[in-house]
């Protein structure tokens, strides 16, 4: 804390009350010292209040599994959350020992942090649970076996959130250490990140998450990010493993952020599949980029790329680089004659799902690339 000296004190008080300055000049140092202590206390209170605001968060809806016996059969449906000041917390969160849950048909908008968050391995949530990176224990401290379908998220950023120091970090859909979760047929736009599969805990993974049939557009940092956001062994040093990112349509989603890519591989991505996606880059950015370290055994193929190159990754050789011919910049359905029609990889099988983003049958002849099956 900066301590205000005598001369500075006079200038400070002059801005507050000119009459007080004259009293100080007339009474002398004793009065100066008392006012100085008052100013110091005021600064201490202000700084303490700011620190508390940065530490203390608030949720719109929160489900916590806090016991070794899992919380099960949780359904969060058709809620609307908006205009929330969240601090370091999230609008809708499922955290801890929770399994067999559904998040369906909700809308979140105009909030200053993450919209939907699915978390594992926070020890203060369930200290008596197992912290092992497994899915088959009843007592494991991670969210798992969930369905996130038909939700909409828009207008969320941490840019003005004091807890983030001006950094854009708010994903519309964020999995931090969760496992076995399907995120399908959702919409995300005007967020910092569309979807992020990360893990904030070293040697812990976001595992076997399926992201399919989503419309992600007009986001600032990236459409989809995977892997731990830090290459070290501290916070953010986890991994993303055995995840499938298939049949999504990602458009103009690195408008004004730090990633410069429609799809970003961060750190410690292992055995993930990126297939059958349409990626239309923001002008001057990459479609898909490897921006981290320790990424291996990932498959990138059968995608359609437009307006940007691949950076640091190798495509499997079956992708298309053409204008996808979408209906419009905000209507991401395929128009007649789109080169994405019948160009997908049918070998993704059940991971593509039976239905597209609109609930129409996924395969009519050969599977299309992108979230819409024409």
Image (cartoon, rainbow, N blue to C red):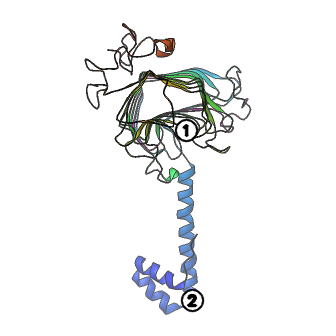
- Rendered residue at 29%/31% (across/down): 330
Residue 170 visible at all: yes
Q: Nearer the viewer, residue 215 or 104?
A: 215
Q: Nearer the viewer, residue 228 or 67?
A: 228
Q: Is residue 177 visible?
A: no
Tell me the crowding category of disc 2: few under 14, some 14 to 19, or many 20 or more residues within 10 angstroms, Cα based: few
Q: Residue at x 37, y 7 (%)?
A: 365
Provide the residue span drawn in magenta: 102-130
Location of mark 1 (residue) = 266
Residue 313: give its label: none
SS category of the residue bearing label 1:
loop
150 lies above or below 87: above
Nearer the camera: disc 1 or disc 2: 1
Q: Nearer the viewer, residue 12 or 151?
A: 151
Residue 251 percent across, percent down from the top left: 36, 32
Classify residue 12 as left or right of residue 155. Answer: right
Q: Which residue is mark 2?
A: 29
Quadrant, the C terminus: top left
Quarter of the image where one finds residue 294: top right
Q: Is residue 242 left or right of residue 337?
A: right
Residue lying furthest front in this view? 317
| Magenta stretch: includes residue 107 | yes
């Amino acid at each position: 804390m900066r301590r205000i000296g005598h001369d500075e004190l006079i200038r400070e008080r002059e801005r507050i009350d000119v009459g007080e300055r004259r009293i100080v000049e007339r009474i002398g140092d004793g009065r100066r010292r008392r006012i100085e202590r008052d100013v110091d206390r005021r600064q201490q209170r202000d700084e303490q209040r700011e620190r508390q605001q940065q530490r203390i968060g608030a949720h719109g809806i929160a489900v916590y599994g806090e016991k070794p016996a899992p919380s099960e059969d949780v359904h969060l449906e058709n809620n609307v959350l908006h205009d929330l000041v969240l601090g370091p917390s999230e609008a809708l969160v499922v955290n801890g020992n929770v399994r067999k849950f559904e998040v369906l048909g909700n809308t979140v908008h105009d909030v200053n942090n993450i919209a939907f968050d699915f978390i594992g391995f926070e020890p203060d949530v369930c200290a008596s649970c197992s912290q092992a990176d497994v899915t088959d224990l009843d007592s494991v401290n991670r969210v798992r076996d969930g369905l996130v379908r038909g939700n909409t998220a828009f207008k969320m950023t941490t840019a003005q959130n004091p807890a983030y120091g001006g950094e854009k970090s708010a994903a519309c859909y964020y999995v931090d250490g969760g496992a076995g979760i399907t995120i399908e047929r959702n919409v995300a736009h005007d967020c910092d990140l569309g979807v992020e599969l990360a893990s904030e805990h070293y040697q812990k993974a976001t595992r076997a998450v399926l992201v399919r049939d989503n419309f992600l557009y007009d986001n600032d940092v990236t459409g989809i990010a995977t892997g731990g956001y830090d290459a070290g062994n501290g916070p953010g040093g986890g991994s993303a493993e055995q995840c499938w990112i298939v049949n999504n349509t990602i458009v103009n989603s690195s408008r004004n952020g730090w990633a410069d890519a429609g799809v970003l591989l961060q750190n410690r991505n292992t055995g993930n599949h990126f297939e059958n996606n349409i990626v239309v880059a923001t002008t001057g950015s990459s479609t898909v980029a490897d921006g981290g370290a320790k990424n291996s055994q990932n498959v990138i193929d059968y995608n359609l790329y437009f307006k940007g190159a691949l950076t640091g990754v190798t495509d499997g050789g079956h992708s298309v680089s053409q204008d996808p011919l979408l209906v419009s910049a905000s209507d991401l359905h395929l128009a007649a004659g789109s080169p994405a029609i019948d160009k997908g990889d049918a070998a993704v099988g059940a991971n593509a799902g039976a239905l597209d983003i609109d609930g129409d049958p996924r395969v009519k002849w050969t599977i299309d690339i992108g979230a819409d099956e024409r």
